[in-house]
Amino acid sequence: MMKVVDSISRMSTLVKMLKKEGKSVGLVPTMGYLHEGHLSLVRTAKKHTDVAVISIFVNPAQFGPGEDFDKYPRDFKRDEELARSAGADILFYPSVKDMYPKGYSTYVNVEALTDTLCGVSRPGHFRGVTTVVAKLFGIVKPDVAYFGQKDAQQAIVIKKMAEDLNMGIEVKALPTVREQDGLAMSSRNVYLSNGERQDAMSLSQALARAEALVKQGERDPGKLIKAMEEIIQKKPSARIDYVSIVDTTGLKPMDKITGEILVALAVFIGKTRLIDNVIIKVDSKDDKSKFAKKGAQ
Ligand code: PAF
């Protein structure tokens, strides 16, 4: 039976009990409006840890002014059913007041890694993410925490935070779950009209093109970026925020495609900002046959 826990103090008491019993805890932090991407993380947590906790909290601290905090899709009953069906043991559902009481004043900021990619057009976003995730880690005290690879920068930033702050938590990023036509699953996909939904396919199509070009031997990041931009720019509702090729540790732009690269993009489809990425591994000896795609970290 899945327990729904809606206060921090009750969650802390429960965690204390579980730890006393020697149980390992897996945490899947989410903002709800669950889809198969989230559920696959819950299933993995369930498989590898004794107790699978999913948290649902639409975190005001990670939305900028004018972003979609108010209209972010919410449906607790639906989420409760889905979490239960995926095998979650505990659904943690704290309120904003409980998480950020009056006078709240502590924030966690990972430097450098957050100055690039999504950090440029969403200033303060990652500070909100790392703050809430640090709080969730402090409350749930997981052994392992699971995130989606779709938010590649987020996963890298959270890994760095856990490492730098000696949190003793294993942070795992698991493969992006996609719709049949390639669109990466996201709670924000519900914002798309039918026409926009068609245009949104250009994100994964552009990434597939980049992969194909690397496989054919292309090693110039500029050429890859141009080829991707051309695919996206053909779509009437698309406006590119960024298309970037960076290394997977420092998230720094690359002069030449070599080693492990993160090809990441953010595109406005109408008013909806979507992101997607792929990690490609290229043998440093430039041997085409050694091309390998990396699905998970
Ligand atoms: O990826 C998300 O849904 C959120 O950024 C997270 C990690 C749950 C923090 O609010």
Image: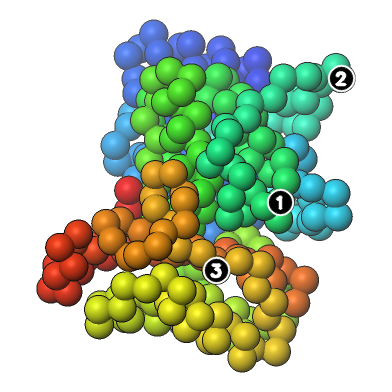
Q: How many other residues sit within 10 Å of disc 2, few (<14), some (14-19) or many (≥20)?
A: few
Q: Position of residue 296 (x, y in %)?
A: 32, 53
At horizontal 47% and vertical 51% (from top left) the residue drawn is 252
Is the C-beta of the residue carrying label 2 under 8 Å from the nearest atom of ligand 1? no
Q: Amino acid at mark 1?
A: Arg
Chain-order first, disc 1 or disc 2: 2
Pointers 1 and 2 in contact (C-beta within 8 Å): no
Return the residue nearer the eye: 135 or 273: 273
Give the secondary structure at mark 2.
Answer: loop
Residue to which mark 3 is pinned: 243
Most extreme residue toward the front is 255
Image position of 238 (left or right of 170): right
Rounded to the nearest angstrom, the CA distance separating label 1 from label 2 is 25 Å
Q: Amino acid at mark 3?
A: Val
Rounded to the nearest angstrom, the CA distance separating label 2 from label 3 is 40 Å
Is the C-beta of the residue carrying label 1 under 8 Å from the nearest atom of ligand 1? no
Chain-order first, disc 1 or disc 3: 1
Q: Is residue 84 visible?
A: no
Give the secondary structure at mark 1.
Answer: loop
267, above or below 6, in the image: below
Return the residue nearer the eye: 293 or 36: 293
Residue to which mark 1 is pinned: 122
Residue to which mark 2 is pinned: 102
At horizontal 69% and vertical 31% (from top left) the residue drawn is 94
Give the secondary structure at mark 3.
Answer: strand
Looking at the image, is mark 1 or mark 3 nearer the viewer? 3
Q: Amino acid at mark 2?
A: Lys
Chain-order first, disc 2 or disc 3: 2
At horizontal 62% and vertical 30% (from top left) the residue drawn is 109
